[in-house]
């Protein structure tokens, strides 16, 4: 599980693993060629049936093979998908997905890692059968099949252990909380936005923004964008900056997303300070 507040950089992290070969080489070295990451944005299957979700995972796998120019694997997996889908049967489609994973994990000896981005958007639809299917894939491929759930709070809190029962042993205790502040990444993003905007912010303004947002990626991005677009002289005091940014609609929308992700008890706790 990769956990952070909404806008905390989870999608960026998963995207780098999927699309940036240099990042994979930096962290995995020569072993990166044995890992195949499959990015699946679960916002796309919100409130979809298990059949459609299985089809979505199959299509995500096929697309990932095409993007990495794995021609042979792409052709074989596409053929399996077309044959399986032609029966219009949920069980047969899942059997096809099993064969595709067998091809990659057992025959090609790749470690297939599904990256489930924005999985919190799907949890209200998730069924025990969904997690049972993940367990079946894991049992076949063993350590060459993994799933990373990107969520804004632990799955146990979002779903409960009963629904997760078939897959819970692989989830429990395997949790990474993303820190708010990623200084190298933040410095790069700010310099890039300054270059695109054709303006440079003073160190005082940038330091004040980071202090105000605690380095939260989305809030910091919106703050820098608003500062670059503003024609007025920004105050560097905390109160002055907060007043300015609370007037910005994108900032209020981002804060509201964070607020909605909190439980009633967490919201109540925050309002007591």
Image (cartoon, rainbow, N blue to C red):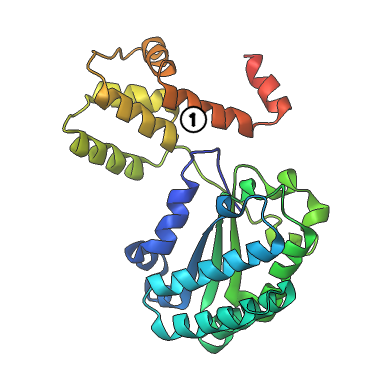
Identify the residue at image location x=28%, y=14%: 234
Q: Please tell me whether mark 1 sits on a helix, a strand or a loop.
A: helix
* Residue 262 point in image, percent of width and height: 65, 31
For disc 1, the neighbor class at 10 Å (few under 14, some 14 to 19, many from 20) is some
> In the drawing, does residue 88 fall left or right of residue 248?
right
Q: Taking 229 as reference, is 234 above or below it?
A: above
* Residue 51 point in image, percent of width and height: 69, 65
Depth check, front residue: 68 or 10: 68
Depth check, front residue: 249 or 268: 249
Determine the image quadrant of residue 20: bottom left
Depth check, front residue: 240 or 50: 50
> In the drawing, does residue 268 fall left or right of residue 201?
right
* Residue 194 point in image, percent of width and height: 22, 34
* Residue 95 point in image, percent of width and height: 68, 80
Q: Taking 271 as reference, is 211 above or below it?
A: below
Tally the marks. 1
Q: Taking 36 as reference, is 253 above or below it?
A: above
Residue under label 1:
254
Q: Quadrant of the image for the C terminus?
A: top right
Depth check, front residue: 95 or 115: 95
Determine the image quadrant of residue 55: bottom right
> Which residue ends up furthest to the left in the rendered image?
198
Identify the residue at image location x=36%, y=27%: 223
Determine the image quadrant of residue 158: top right
Identify the residue at image location x=26%, y=37%: 193
Identify the residue at image location x=18%, y=29%: 200
> Which residue ends up furthest to the bottom in the rendered image?
107
> Which residue ends up furthest to the right in the rendered image?
162
């Amino acid at each position: 599980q990769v956990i952070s507040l909404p806008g905390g950089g989870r999608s960026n992290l998963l995207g780098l693993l999927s699309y940036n070969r240099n990042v994979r080489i930096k962290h995995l070295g020569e072993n990166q060629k044995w890992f195949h990451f499959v990015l699946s944005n679960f916002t796309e299957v919100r409130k979809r049936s298990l059949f459609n979700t299985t089809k979505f995972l199959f299509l995500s796998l096929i697309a990932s093979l095409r993007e990495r120019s794995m021609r042979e694997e792409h052709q074989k997996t596409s053929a399996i998908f077309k044959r399986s889908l032609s029966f219009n049967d949920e069980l047969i489609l899942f059997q096809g997905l099993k064969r595709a994973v067998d091809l990659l994990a057992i025959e090609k000896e790749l470690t297939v890692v599904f990256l489930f981005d924005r999985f919190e958007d799907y949890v209200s639809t998730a069924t025990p059968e969904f997690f049972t299917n993940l367990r079946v894939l894991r049992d076949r491929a063993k350590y060459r099949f993994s799933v990373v759930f990107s969520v804004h709070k632990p799955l146990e809190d979002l779903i409960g252990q009963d629904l997760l029962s078939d897959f819970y042993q692989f989830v429990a205790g395997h949790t990474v909380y993303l820190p708010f502040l990623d200084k190298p990444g933040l410095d790069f993003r700010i310099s890039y936005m300054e270059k695109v905007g054709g303006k440079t912010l003073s160190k005082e303004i940038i330091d004040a923004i980071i202090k105000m947002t605690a380095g939260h990626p989305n809030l910091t991005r919106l703050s820098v964008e608003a500062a670059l677009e503003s024609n007025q002289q920004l105050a560097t005091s905390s109160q002055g900056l907060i007043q300015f940014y609370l007037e910005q609609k994108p900032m209020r929308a981002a804060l509201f997303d964070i607020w909605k992700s909190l439980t009633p008890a967490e919201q109540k706790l925050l309002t007591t300070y």
